[in-house]
Each structure stands twice: as C-alpha cells, then as structure tokens.
Image: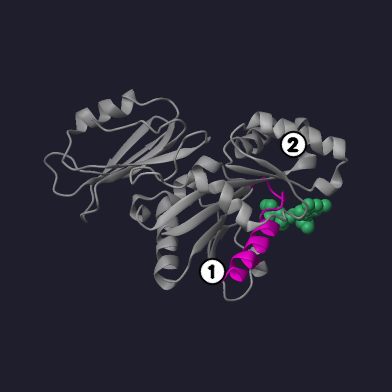
C-alpha cells in the first residue's frame, strides 16, 4: 500500500513550502515520494519547484475536485503504473479546493487496495486567521472548512505574529477543530516523522475502513458487496443514511444486470451509469461519523 497525504490550505498559506520540506525528508529516510498537484490556470509554477527525479503528475485547468474524477483517476493510475517503487504520494490541492471534494477525487474504489489515505494536513496562514473577518463570506467559509476537516493543523507564518497572538491563534484553532493537533510553524517546517505519527491513528483498523472515523472530522468507509442488490432497496438505504454522508461512489451489483453499475451520490443527488467492464462491486463513502454504516 502506498501512503497518501493530502496538503490543504488557503492560497499562499505555505503548502508548497511544506511539500518541498517533506519531499527532502522522505528521500533522506530512503523512501521514494511522488507528487500529485494541481493549480488554477494552465501554467504550473509550483511544479518547477519540485526537484528532478520525483515523479510528478499535475491536473491543470481546474483543480482535482472539479476536473472530474475520471481524469484524476487516470493520472493516479498512470503514476502508480509508471512508478512501481513509490512509497508515499503527496497531494497538494489548490488553495481553492474544498477538502471533501479533494478527498473525493482520490477515494476511488479502483485504488482501494493500493492507496492508504493517511489524512489531511491543512496549512493555516496564522495572520489571515486573525484577519479572517475581512474575507468575503464565501471565501471565509472555504478557509474555515479547510481547517475544520484537517487531521493535523500547521499554524504557519508564526514569525509574523507576537507570541501572545500566536497563542490566541493556536487556542482558537484547537477549539474550532478539536480533533486535530495544532503545530506552530515557520516556513511550514515540520518533521515528517511527526506527521506520520499523528496520522498513524487514521490508518485502517479493519479491511472495511480506509480511515477510521473515531475522533476525526472526516472519514471514509469501504463497503463490499457479496451479492446483487435491488435498485429500489439500495436507494431506500441511501435515503436512510445520515446527513453527514457527503459523497459516495462505487460499483453496485444490481439484480438483473451483468456488470455492477457505476453509482454516484453527491449532496443528495444520485446517479447510475451502466458499465461495460466488470468492476469489483464496492462502494466508498465519505463523511463524518460514518464508521457504523453497513449495507443491509
Ligand atoms: N513570513 C513567512 N512567509 C512564509 C512562511 N511560509 C511561507 N511563506 C511565504 O508565503 C508565500 C506562499 O508560500 P507557498 O509555500 O508558496 O504557499 P502555497 O500555499 O503553496 O501557495 P499557493 O500555491 O499560492 O496556494 C511564499 O512567498 C513563502 O515564502 C512563513 O512561515 N512565514
């Protein structure tokens, strides 16, 4: 299994700095990192910053959350195929990505056996946190969502604030996202071994859950089907799920069909598509507090 870390955070918060620091630490430990990044616009600037020899895939013209998961799936698939020896994938999301949508793009049932998604590290511009009331409501909502869904928070740019301001930032962040440890950083410098240790608890505990949801803001759950299901029963079950289920996708074996259908669910909307290939019948669910969900 390849470990996957997602770097989230607002535009200019320090994600690229974190990426570069972490790449060199992973290499020093004798492992091979690969990078998956995206940018708004069709010119990639940050990718130039990644050293030669580190496999890199990019999604241009949009972000991994909105270019459609097919493109992302294809990119990750080729990254894995072309680089059989990679140990860790680091994903830098665009500063404008919502963390649920960014996670969604990599939680494909296709990779359920290959990728071990360790969690989201959000880099916070500490000065911007204090000034957040100046952001427009939509932008502020996104900034706050990136913080709320993190498994680890870096209170970055601590050099720009006084000690007492930093103490306020750390305390407020810890109150806002009680599950994530908060680390004050300059230049997003942090030991990768610490990240590994903190996100260790998000590692799968059983073969049915990719991230264990216990005490964590966002989690995922993998459901495997052993027999065909009736479409009506399945849709009834979908309706019965809690509101904290944000996203589902996978291949559902329907009674009377040869191949499992591609099933998608987002924000209350359901879609079905027939598949011409026999995909493994399983479903990925992303949400909060979803650990006990079963299909029955
Ligand atoms: N003063 C200060 N500047 C920082 C710190 N960390 C990063 N920066 C600067 O902030 C700017 C943005 O840093 P990046 O690492 O590129 O941030 P990013 O989140 O990748 O930015 P985007 O790709 O635009 O979303 C750069 O000019 C960095 O040098 C810090 O701790 N203190």
Q: Which residues are magenta?
A: 9-31
Residue 118, percent across and down?
A: 50, 50
Q: Characterize the local packing of mark 1: few (<14), some (14-19) or many (20 or more) Cα atoms within 10 angstroms.
A: some
Q: Which type of secondary structure does the marked residue at label 2 adopt?
A: helix
Give the residue at mark 2.
170
Q: Residue at x 57, y 42 (%)?
A: 151
Which residue is pictured at 20% across the width and 54% down the height?
Answer: 278
Number of the label disc, if any, that sits on residue 31: 1
| Residue 161 in magenta stretch | no
| Label 1: element kind | loop
Labelled disc at residue 225: none
Along the line of sight, which residue is nearer the eye, 268 or 31?
Answer: 31
Q: Is residue 198 in sight in this rendering? A: yes
Give percent across and percent down for residue 154: 69, 46
Ligand 1, image quadrant it occupies: bottom right
Number of numbered callouts drawn: 2
Quadrant containing the C terminus in the rendered view: top left
């Amino acid at each position: 299994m390849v470990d996957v870390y997602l770097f989230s955070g607002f535009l200019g918060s320090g994600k690229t700095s974190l990426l570069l620091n972490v790449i060199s630490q992973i290499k020093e430990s004798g492992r091979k990192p690969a990078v998956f990044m995206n940018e708004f616009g069709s010119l990639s600037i940050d990718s130039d910053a990644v050293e030669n020899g580190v496999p890199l895939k990019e999604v241009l013209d949009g972000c991994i959350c909105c270019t459609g998961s097919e493109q992302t799936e294809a990119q990750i698939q080729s990254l894995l195929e072309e680089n059989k020896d990679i140990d860790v994938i680091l994903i830098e999301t665009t500063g404008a990505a919502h963390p649920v949508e960014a996670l969604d793009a990599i939680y494909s049932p296709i990779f359920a056996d290959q990728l071990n998604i360790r969690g989201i590290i959000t880099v916070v511009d500490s000065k911007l946190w204090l000034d957040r009331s100046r952001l427009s409501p939509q932008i502020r909502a996104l900034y706050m969502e990136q913080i709320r869904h993190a498994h680890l928070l870096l209170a970055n740019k601590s050099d720009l604030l006084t000690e007492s301001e930093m103490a306020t930032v750390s305390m407020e962040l810890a109150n806002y996202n009680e599950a994530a440890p908060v680390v004050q950083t300059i230049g997003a410098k942090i030991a990768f071994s610490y990240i590994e240790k903190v996100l260790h608890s998000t590692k799968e505990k059983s073969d049915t859950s990719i991230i264990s949801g216990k005490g964590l803001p966002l989690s995922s759950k993998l459901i495997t089907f052993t027999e065909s299901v009736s479409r009506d029963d399945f849709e009834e079950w979908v309706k019965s799920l809690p509101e904290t289920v944000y996203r589902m996708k996978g291949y559902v074996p329907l009674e009377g069909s040869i191949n499992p259908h591609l099933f998608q669910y987002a924000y209350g909307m359901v879609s079905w598509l027939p598949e011409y290939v026999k995909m493994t019948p399983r479903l990925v669910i992303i949400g909060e507090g979803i650990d006990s969900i079963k299909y029955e």
